[in-house]
Image (spheres, rainbow, N blue to C red):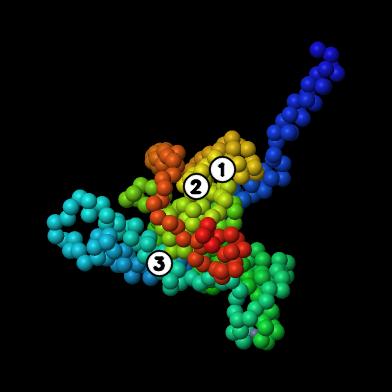
Amino acid sequence: MPASREDEIARALRDAIEALEPITRGQKVAFERRLRGGIAQCASYEDEMAIASAMSVIPIERLKLEGHTASMTIAGDEGADVESVESAESRMERLSARDAELLALLRWFKEEFFSWVDKPPCEHCGGSEMTSIGVEVNALTAEEREGEAGRVELYRCGACVKTTRFPRYNSAIKLLETRRGRCGEWANAFTLCARAMGFRARWCLDWTDHVWTEVYSESQRRWLHCDPCENVCDKPLLYECGWGKKLSYVIAFSIEGVFDVTRRYTQNMRERYRLRGEVYEPWLRKRLAELTSELRSAMLPSEIKELEVQDAVERAELDRPAVDVGESLPGRQTGSLAWRRARGELGPSS
Ligand SMILES: [Zn+2]
C-alpha cells in the first residue's frame, strides 16, 4: 500500500476515534484524582487517634442499650413480650441488635450531635443576619490548615458588621470538635463514627454533589444506605424518587475496595449511562478493579476470598432490577428551603 494511502487511512481512523471520544485526558485525570481522594478519605478513618477521638464523643454504651432494646421489640407491636412464644414471621420482623445500634447511631448523630449550617451565626455578637461576602482559599489560619479546610466561607454580620469565617473542614477529627457543616461534613464525621462503633463503612460520593455512608449489615449480608443528614437508613431511591436528582456516578469507597454502586440508587440505569460522559465505562470498571486489588494486597488470601464472595452477592443484588419502593419518598429535609430548591431537591411535587 502506498504511504499516502496508509496516512489517509490512519487519519480517517483517528477522526473516527476522536468523534467517538467524549473524554479528554484532563477529564480522566480529574476522575482519577477523585478516586484517589476517596481512598485517602477512607484511610483517614483507620487512624488510631481519629477512632479514639470518635469513641470519646459517642455515648457507645447508651447506643448499644438503645439498639438492644429496639431489637427486642417487634416492628409495629411495641408492647409485645418477645420472651413468649414467637412466630418465625415476627422473628423476621425483629431487627438484629447490631442493625438497631446502627439506627441508634444515626438518630444520635442527627438529633444530638451534629448540626446543619446554612450560614453560620456571627461569632462576635451571635447575630443571625449574615451575608455571604466571598470565599478565602489562600490566607488560612493555622487552625484552619490543621483542620484541612479546603476553603473558608466569609460572612458579614448585619448587626455588628464584623466578618465571621466558616472554614469547610475536611479533617474528621476536627469535625468531631466543631460538630457542624453541610452534607460533606456530616458524611465525613458520620463515617468515622460508624468505623469507631466497629461497623464496616463506606464513604459514598455522588458526582451530582452529595455524599453519604453505606454500612455493612452482617445479619442481612448486604450494604445499607445511610444518610446521616436525613437520619435515613436503607432508602437508596431517596435521591432519585424523593429529591428528584438526576444521578450519574455514585462511587463507594472503603479500605476494602472501590465500587460503582450507582445501580443501588436508581430505577433507570440506562438513563444514568446517558449522563455519564466523563470516562469510558470499560476504563472505569478496570480502574475500580485495580484499585480494589491494590487495597486488598496486604490481606490474607482467606480474607480476600470472603470479600470476593460478598462482592459477587452485591453484584447480583445490583443487577436485579430496582423494585418499586411502594412508598412515597420525601424531598430533602435538611438545609433552608431556598437552598434545597436551588439544588432542585424538594422532590417532584414541589
Ligand atoms: Zn455580629
Q: Secondary structure at mark 2?
A: loop
Q: Quadrant of the N terminus?
A: top right
Q: Secondary structure at mark 1?
A: helix
Contact flag, marks 1 and 3 (Cβ < 8 Å): no
Residue at mark 3: 107
Q: Residue furthest front?
A: 349
Mark number, residue 271:
1
Q: Is residue 169 visible?
A: no
Amino acid type at circle 2 is Thr
Separation of marks 2 and 3 at Cα, in angstroms: 25 Å
Residue at mark 2: 266
Indicate the position of residue 228 as horizontal and vertical percent values.
47, 63
Mark number, residue 341:
none
Instruction: Report ligand 1 position as a quadrant.
Output: bottom right
At x 60% / y 68%, what residue is drawn? 338
At x 71% / y 66%, what residue is drawn? 137
